[in-house]
Amino acid sequence: MLVEHHMDLVMSVCHDVVVLDFGKVIAAGTPEQVRDNPLVTEAYLGADVPAERPARRRARWPGHERRRRHPAGRGPQLRLRPGAGTAGRHAHRPRRDRHAVLGANGAGKTTLLRTLSGLLRPTGGRVLFDGADLRGVRVERLVRRGLAHVPEGRGVVAELTVDENLRLGGLWRRDRADARRAQDEVYQLFEPLARRRRHAGHQLSGGERQMLALGRALVARPRLLLLDEPSLGLAPRVTAQIMALLRQLCDSDGLTVLLVEQNVRSALSVADQGVVMSLGRVVMATPAVQLRDDATLRHAYLGF
Amino acid sequence: MDRFLFLTFDGLSTGAVYAAFALALVLIWRAARLVNFAQGAMAVATAYVGYAVVSATGSYWLGFGAAVLAGLALGALVERVLMRFVGHANPLNDVIVALGLVLLIQAVLGIVFGNEYRPAAAPFDTDALSVGGISAMSPYDLWVLGAVLAVVVLLGLLFTRTPIGLRMRASAFAPEVSRLLGVNVGRMLTVGWALAAAVGALAGMLVIPTGLGLHPHAMDLVFVIAFTAAVVGGLDSPAARWSAACWSA
């Protein structure tokens, strides 16, 4: 008897497969029977996210006018070339603004982000941002170049208050007044945070923590935002809100987002480019609309 | 009753010194997750600097300031050239290196200044004042208590009210996230060590005149008591530490 979530292995060695989801058996039978069960696909790829249009949050990110420093309001162009911390075979040359990196557990998505932001040293290749090589640039300098990384598990400093967390995001900035302004804008954007300014990070709910982590990154007024699993542990409704907000930030601010997600449906609801990773390699990079029903994606997650 | 009151007041100032010394231990513990076993030796070294300045200039206050400045410098130096390069995977590494530093500092002090007790003058009278026929605290005790209280208040303000304090706290709680937010965590560690050693130097300057005088081993016992107080009070809780320090006095 084998307990395993790597479907590749399971499918190749087992005669009988039982699939569990949240403590319930959702499928059982031969590998072929399990493979064709739509519930299994849903459990691994995530259900469709209700396409929530941000009716209430239509108010644009208030700082957008000042931030159009980039030509045509576009964020920096992003390329994932082979060797950027992962052994990718396909060069990725997106021309749009929101990229989702998809793949099963252990595919190397987080490793990719951590390499981009300098937390890990690439074994080969280059990390180019705005034409400059980021290898050898100290992690704490990257935010000054316009790159913000919201790490896995959100990285809210639990011992500090909401206000302190937000201030921390802007401490490096020389323009104190604008840091202050950016912080006020975050409070406008996320009303729940404004109500909990004096509360410590550990008192916040999962959704509030995600808002805080995202808001704290925005205080730096980044041009490239690296987001690691923002939907992790959040209710689908909250996830949809966060995704809608991301879409809005990109549209109004020219922010480029690189989103790492395990939840394919929610990621593709916001991204316009998809990068699929499997076992440390980029196996595909295409426009997101083509990715939804692509077999490569299914293979990367389910191994068949 | 008189004796009880005297011991209580006397204990207050002694306890304050232990609390300050324990505070220095806790500062480094919180910043770097290691107990600085070399803190006693470092404090003695700065006290030698302080009293060298006292005997050269004749001013206790110049010497006091010199000791605290020497503490800042020594703390930063120890972190930059020594502790930074110790692997923290095994906590024993830090302990061994710190103990080695103790031997080094005490040996150097012995060679330079000699292994005998040297007189260390107090700036105030150390005889207890009588209040209503009960001998309570000496002027020196009052100075000690006031100085420690001032340091505690100033450090509290530094950590809660200033940008560098926020950076230091964030670095201690979440170093990786802090780096992503643009905080130079390595520098914060150096600042933490410098502050801790300065507080240790202050505690050394305050406690040495109440003992036998300057000696390379003058702070050994103080270190043991302060360490006990820090552990009993909890290495992460300032208030509990204060009461534990007073209790152990």
Image (cartoon, coloured by chain):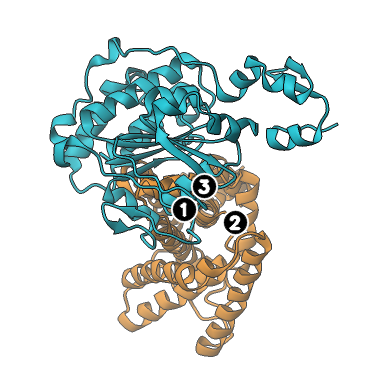
Chain colours: A cyan, B orange
Name which quarter of the figure residue B60 lies in. bottom left
Image height of B36 relative to B46, above or below: above
Using the rendered image of the protein, determine whether residue B217 is visible from the camera's viewpoint.
no
Which residue is at a point 52% across and 57% down the rendered structure image? B21
Q: Which mark is residue A111?
A: 3
Question: Quick one: which residue is furthest to the right in this view?
Answer: A1
Quarter occupied by the C terminus of chain A? top right
Left or right of B126, for residue B4 = right
Marks 1/2: CA–CA distance: 38 Å
> Residue B229 versus residue B36: which sits nearer the camera?
B36
Q: Are marks 1 and 3 on the same chain?
A: yes
For mark 1, does the 10 Å Cα neighbourhood hold few (<14), some (14 to 19), or many (20 or more) residues?
A: some
Image height of B212 relative to A12, above or below: below
For mark 2, does the 10 Å Cα neighbourhood hold few (<14), some (14 to 19), or many (20 or more) residues?
A: many
Q: Amino acid at mark 1?
A: Leu
> Residue B17 versus residue A103: which sits nearer the camera?
A103
Using the rendered image of the protein, determine whether residue A86 is visible from the camera's viewpoint.
yes
Numbered disc 3: secondary structure: helix
Where residue A97 appears, as percent x and y from the top left, is 30, 35
- Chain identity of mark 1: A
Where residue B160 appears, as percent x and y from the top left, is 37, 41
Q: Nearer the viewer, mark 2 or mark 3?
A: 3
Left or right of B44, for residue B156 = left
Which residue is at a point 42% across and 77% down the rendered structure image? B49
Q: Which mark is residue A40?
A: none
Q: Nearer the viewer, mark 1 or mark 3?
A: 3
Q: Which sits earlier in the primary sequence, circle 1 or circle 3?
A: 3
- Label 2 belongs to which residue? B226
